[in-house]
Image (spheres, rainbow, N blue to C red):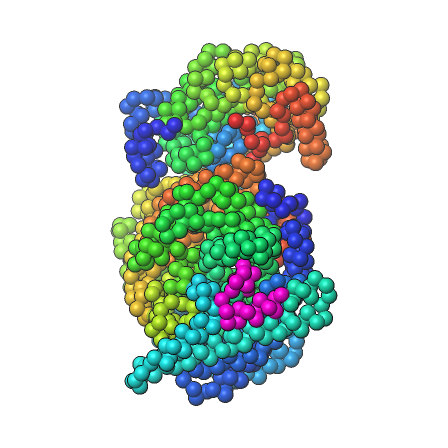
Amino acid sequence: MFCEVHEASGTGSAALSGEAAQNHIMMTEYDTGLTGTVFDIQRFSVHDGPGIRTVVFIKGCSLRCIWCSNPESIKRRPQIGIYPDRCIGTGKCGECLEAVPAADLLIVKERKVVGLNTDRPEVCLPCAAVCPTGALKVWGEKTTVGEVMTEVLSDRQFYEESGGGLTLSGGESLIQARFAVELLKAAHVEGLNTCVETALNYDAEVLDKALPYMDLAYCDLKHMDSGAHKRFTGVANERILENLKKIVDSGTRVVIRIPVVPGHNGTEENLRATAKFLVDDIGGNVVQIQLLPFRKLGVEKYAALGMPYPMKDFEAPPRDVWERDIRQFAAMMSAYGLNAVAGSGARIPK
Amino acid sequence: MGQIGYEEDSWGVGVSGVVNDPSPFPRINRLRDWYLDECPCTIDAERAVLLTEAYKKFENEPQLIKVARALAHVMRNVTLHIVDGQLLVGDSAAPPKSCPIYPEFSYSWIANELSEFPPRERPNNRYDYNDDTERQLLEITDYWQGKTVSDSILDRMTPEEMKGDFMGIMLYSTSLYHIAGVGHLVPDFDTLLKNGYGGLQQDVQDRLNALTGDDPDTEEQRHFYHAQLITLDATIDYIRRYAALAREKANTAGGQRRDELLRMADNIESISTNPPETFWQAYQLVHFAWSIIQIESNGHSVSWGRLDQTLYPFFLKDLAQGTASREFMQEVIECHAPLCASFMKLRDWVTTQANSGRGLGTMTVTLGGVDADGNDASNELSGMFIDMVAHTRLGYPWTAARFHENTPEWFSAKVAKAMRMGTGEPKIFSDQVIIPTMKLRGISDEDAHNYAIVGCVELSVPGREYGWHDSAYFSIARVLELAINDGYAIGHEDKGRLGPATGNLEDFQFFEEVQKAYEEQMAYWVETQARSTDIMDDVHREMKPLPYLSLLIEGCTETGKDVNTGAAPYNFTGPQATGVASTADSLAVIKQLVFEEKKVSAGELMDAIKSDWEGFDALYHLVNSDKMHQYGNDDDYADELAIYATDVYCDKVEGRPNPRGGIYQPGVYTVSANVPFGMVQAASPDGRKAHEPLSDCIGPVHTYVGSHDRKGPTAVIKSASKLHQQRMSNGTLLNLRFCPSSLCGESGVKNLVSLATAYFRKGMHMQINVLGRELLEDAYQHPEKYRGLMVRVAGYSAQWSDLSDELRRDIMTRTEMSFD
Ligand code: SF4
Ligand code: SF4
């Protein structure tokens, strides 16, 4: 399955074979120069598809889920997170003050940088570039398909051993559609397995382009009631459900992921409705349904990005209670003949 | 307490030894509880007293005869023990979990600690003893004054050899063999199992009878054979005393235990001279053979070799003849765990803080791997030893699994399931890398295929190698310090210039000059270290011949020469480089910030480390940030420097002759020496503060403000794979730490095996720690709640509750490589 370029390069260092592959491909099969914005690349990811994988996090999302725990993923352009706790003080350091393009852009309180005085954080990128402590951190970097693939391919030996590959995540991994599709294509050219995590809120043409390069799709279902869906995520769910059908009909393997939020979508009524939909409208053609426990993460991230946290006042039930409930929900959905599991750690059936 | 079962899928992930009743055999669970809860750790004076008596009595005998008579005197008179319920016997010349004392190696520190800082008052690793023991031990102090191996080594060392050693600035430390025996070998069990002690005796007697002539060499051979016969006589008597004790115990025991003890007595009696017939007898004989090596000398890491191969014929024969069931043989194997764990070694308090172990050391069982023809050698017994690890979880005997390209899936999966329990066992090794590496050092193809692990990391040929594998730890991070500070050690300027005058960082125009200085310092310090080590080698040869061990190393009886003289087919000396990543990241900071980006001046950087970064906050955070090239991220810039730093070390060590007719061979690992070596070094350019540990083994830098590896285990593995490990023939070690969630389920096993297999294309040896941060933090607050929690310290596992505060914190700052 692995591409001949690698075979030809022998058993030398995988970094080299990655590069060799890269050079070969550059001339022919995918557009290495295409740019996109990525906010993280995580190697050795083991819960986002089979084997050992690298997850590329694409920036930007068309939903606004009130429970989103990745606020840094929502806006498409680069942002700067401010972490005053990490600032060692403008007296001891002050590197950012020397780099800042206009004096009043940084808000300094008690000799610590605590915020930005602009709604165009890009102008402060030079400050973040010199901050030695990570008190100013850039979220989102413009990069190219070639650069991302170089990093992805450096773990080729681990994909080979484990049957892993590339996973695209976000935000909405297909929001930068051309960039994402090119990455998936590149991965296939290189012989890697591909997975895509998606919330499905886009035009059907996006799927037409991506589906040929998608081995497994992780599809979010947030709520079955369109009104509630709009309340919690900012958009209605009709197009999402249509897209889900489209993926399933294409024969692509689908795992459903439901972030189960107590009192919001984490109700028996909604989860029964979801199960019924999956059975009646999708023919039960999904390989697994993962119920993910909502945890109140991301409070600091919202603060760092200067964004309000919609779930600020939400009190999560104790962990053991909620985990027990989720296991019960999984059992309940399984009773419909579906393969519903708690968490993302269970093995995905072949 | 974790919920676990006996079968491999239910051994648990990250639960370590914090479990009750892990074995399906009630006997084993009882022995385990006895070991963990009931039997105290003590110090015992009997060996020291008996040995001193004999040394006095035979003072004027030739050294070989004297040491043989002393060993015989101990074996004939020491009190013996059989633990209730045990199927195997054989003490350390002390009660279970008691430290015998070896005054012939070194004694002043023991006398000092007894008076100044009594081991019974230590905050951790405490040992009990009564006033009588204390008195007996203090009484022999005067006799040993000036008579120990350590005293003679000190006499012969010049100030030049001492200034860099543990008595000076500790750029390197040769302390291990300076104060204790050498060990680090696998005895030739095969010949013993074939011929029995009776056969060995006959062989030696025949050779003695055949000697003619009276030149000094023949006279020396005569002494040697005499000495061997003395120890053999005593060995046979010693074993028979156990048979008698078993009979005596049978008299008062009831029912099944009575029968068991009588059968043990028969077994033991029979193997005192005869070759063993059954699996049980063979195992018992192997244990006797091993334990007597440990009574003769306290060198640690005397290992078991490939027991799944050695014992396999007995296993098959018992099954075929119906002499023993699989279950019974499993029980025998599991009985060995508490017995091995009962062997303890008293270490001085400084070493204890760094090593934090009570055990005698790495007595490793090697499992799996290929046979002489390159075919897979794993068998049912290999799996039974892995079951033993899961069913006992005591950390002893240590286990190592050899992986190769055709390791069957059942075996690698079973090993991975044991590894993810989080006891730190087994460790895994790559045949693919190790066999060619050993051949590069002149080891024959057949012997290389048959390698076994000794100690934490080292590779050795069973029965044919005396490898001095742990001869010294050597800080390459300190070498770099002297290279940028004109040969002075920071903070020790009062001692004058210690190394060659290679200039100050401020004087250098180009990075290449830093490299030149590093190479010059390296040449000087490696040679100085080797001279110290050679002195120790000479003293061990002259003062502490090992006639008993020489029975079990090929080449000794054949030539009539002690193992210390170089009689084994393979003789090495193996010092280890420590601080690889600390050195690489320091070089990267110098190269990147001072010479390329010119962000800081050389003077500023030197001021910063000399003042422990005080007043250089921004720089301190910068060098610890992801804006720097750092080893462990699959970043060629930094990784090339790590290759360079270790290659320079290997260049100087490789092939230097040693006094036993062999050569020096480099290893690159720290075990836990990175902690004490860090403790004595000033701050370094990589962002390490003064006294902070150096980087661990061949892993990345972790400092108080963060870990320098940011891309997870695959990137660490890629970086480590770039090092020229095929030159590091004394061994390397990569420690990885995982949170349990990344290793759960079937896919967790598969991913772990995949990681290892990918690493083993270029890497030799990997160990893992599996610990959730939550668990670790709770364990830090409440060590008492974590009875039985084994953690991989670095190269070895230890009980969490035995670790020093510093080591516990060191473990906690390692990166948790996981994804939720
Ligand atoms: S550069 Fe960073 S650490 Fe320094 S003062 Fe600015 S925000 Fe604080
Ligand atoms: S779809 Fe995912 S990334 Fe987008 S807002 Fe919702 S939770 Fe956040």
| Residue A41 found in image quarter | top left
Percent across and percent down for residue A151 are 39, 33
| Residue A150 found in image quarter | top left
Q: Is residue B332 above or below residue A130?
A: below
Residue pictured at 55% horizontal, 15% vertical? A244
| Residue B238 found in image quarter | bottom right
Q: Using the image as rendered, state which of residue B203 and residue B400 is in the foreground.
A: B203
Q: Along the horizontal axis of the image, is B144 left or right of B506? A: right
Residue pictured at 37% horizontal, 81% vertical? B209
Residue B403 in sight here: yes
Residue B282 part of the magenta-drawn span: yes
Q: Is residue A194 above or below residue B794?
A: above
Q: Furthest-front residue in view?
A: B321
Percent across and percent down for residue B359 are 55, 63
Q: Along the horizontal axis of the image, is B232 left or right of A221? A: left
Residue B92 in sight here: no
Residue A74 part of the magenta-drawn span: no
For the record, the magenta segment spans B263-284
Instruction: Specify the quadrant that holds the C terminus of chain B.
Output: top right
Percent across and percent down for residue B210 are 34, 79
